[in-house]
Image (cartoon, rainbow, N blue to C red):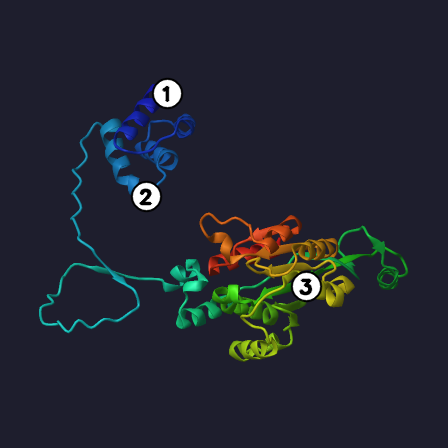
Amino acid sequence: MDAAVVAFARVLRGVGLEVPVGNVLVFADALSIVGVAERDDVYWAGLATLVHRPEDIGAYDRAFAAFWEGRRAPPVDEPETLEVTIALDDGVEEDTGDHGDQTPSDDPTIHVRFSASEVLRRKDFARYTSAELDEARRLMADLRLIGARRRSRRRIRSRLDRGRPDLRRTVRAALRAGGEPVRRRHTEAGERPRRLVLLLDVSGSMEPYARALARFVHAAVVGRGRVEAFALGTRLTRITRELSSRDPDQALRQAAHSVADWAGGTRLGDDLRAFNDTWGVRGMARGAIVVILSDGWDRGDPATMTEQMARLSRVAHRIVWVNPLKATAGYAPLARGMAAALPYVDDFVEGHSLEAIEQLARVIAR
């Protein structure tokens, strides 16, 4: 019996079926139960244990007929060769003006539409056209920034029998049970999302990227609670209220109007000092995720940048630096501001494309 099972497995492998040794052992166990007296018992035992794909059933039938029944199976007709035409459609209609020479074909045609959004995800923001920038804004609006969570002072009901006793709920449950505290209730500390603080560099060196990153900051402000936004230039400007409008064009116009030094110079160290003194150290950055979107070019004193980054790192939960130039081949953080800030940065990521922004969203969610 075992020799016949092994020989049949070799026949199946010879006609192209994948028959692992484990399946052969299962087939042998099945035959030891059903026996080989009935043709259907052997056929279905082999089909259930040795065949994994529907397209292998024909080959199995021919091998079964030849091995177990000693007869020749009917030949298999070769499938007719079918030519298929693949038409690539990039979404742009072109009229060549030559319609008379086109001959209709009976061959089936598969139309494949080119995905402009997929290419746009990897394209550098600096090479965007106005139309592509509008499309990127719509794609950024679909991003959902889910930040890390922290323990809250507010307590919530615990489903487990642990935590701080909840006397009120325990007494109420006992009254419904005739005064017997059948089950004790507990509370546990709740969680709330951490505050997200976005500091966007709007200096002249960031101009190719600031217009796209500003749309990302707007999407974050309107799509998630507890988000604060600031513009970094020759002075610090809070733009959270201006970006709170649902209309992105109106929000960006209001933000640009409130920032007097848009596309001007930048003093990152002085701006960070103003942020720490007025908002950050006083509570806004405490336990928050601080995201700095800048190329690191700073006209100020590097010692100031070092001092203020150290202050910020002591109160913030994490500092994420987004540098669009990081994706450039051969890039090294040699700018004075970037070199001074890097030791205090927890995550140093790219920010030159939609794909990089999606990666940033995943970093924030950690």
Q: Dot 2: within a 10 Å radius of its alpha carbon, few (fewer than 14), some, or many (20 or more) residues?
A: few
Could you say where residue 223 lies in the image, as x and y percent from the top left?
59, 69
Q: Amino acid at mark 3?
A: Asp
Q: Nearer the viewer, residue 266 or 285?
A: 266
Q: Residue at x 52, y 63 (%)?
A: 205
Relative height, residue 49 to residue 307 (above, below): above
- Find disc 2 in the rendering and name its residue: 54
Q: In the rendered view of the protein, which quadrant contains the N terminus? A: top left
Could you say where residue 348 lies in the image, as x and y percent from the top left?
58, 51
- Find disc 3 in the rendering and name its residue: 270
Q: Dot 3: within a 10 Å radius of its alpha carbon, few (fewer than 14), some, or many (20 or more) residues?
A: many
Q: Is residue 299 visible?
A: yes
In primary-sequence order, the first of circles 2 and 1 is: 1
- The reply to whether dot 2 and dot 3 touch (C-beta < 8 Å) is no
Secondary element under disc 3, as helix, strand or loop, is helix
- Find disc 1 in the rendering and name its residue: 2
Q: Residue at x 26, y 36 (%)?
A: 59
Q: Residue at x 72, y 55 (%)?
A: 307
Secondary element under disc 2, as helix, strand or loop, is helix
Q: Amino acid at mark 1?
A: Asp
Q: Is residue 365 visible?
A: no
Q: CA distance from mark 2 to mark 3?
A: 70 Å
In primary-sequence order, the first of circles 2 and 3 is: 2
Q: Nearer the viewer, residue 298 or 95?
A: 298
Q: Amino acid at mark 2?
A: Pro
Furthest toward the top, the residue is 3
Could you say where residue 201 lies in the image, as x and y percent from the top left?
58, 65
Furthest toward the right, the residue is 179
Residue 364's disc number: none
Residue 252 in the figure: left or right of residue 278? left
In primary-sequence order, the first of circles 1 and 3 is: 1
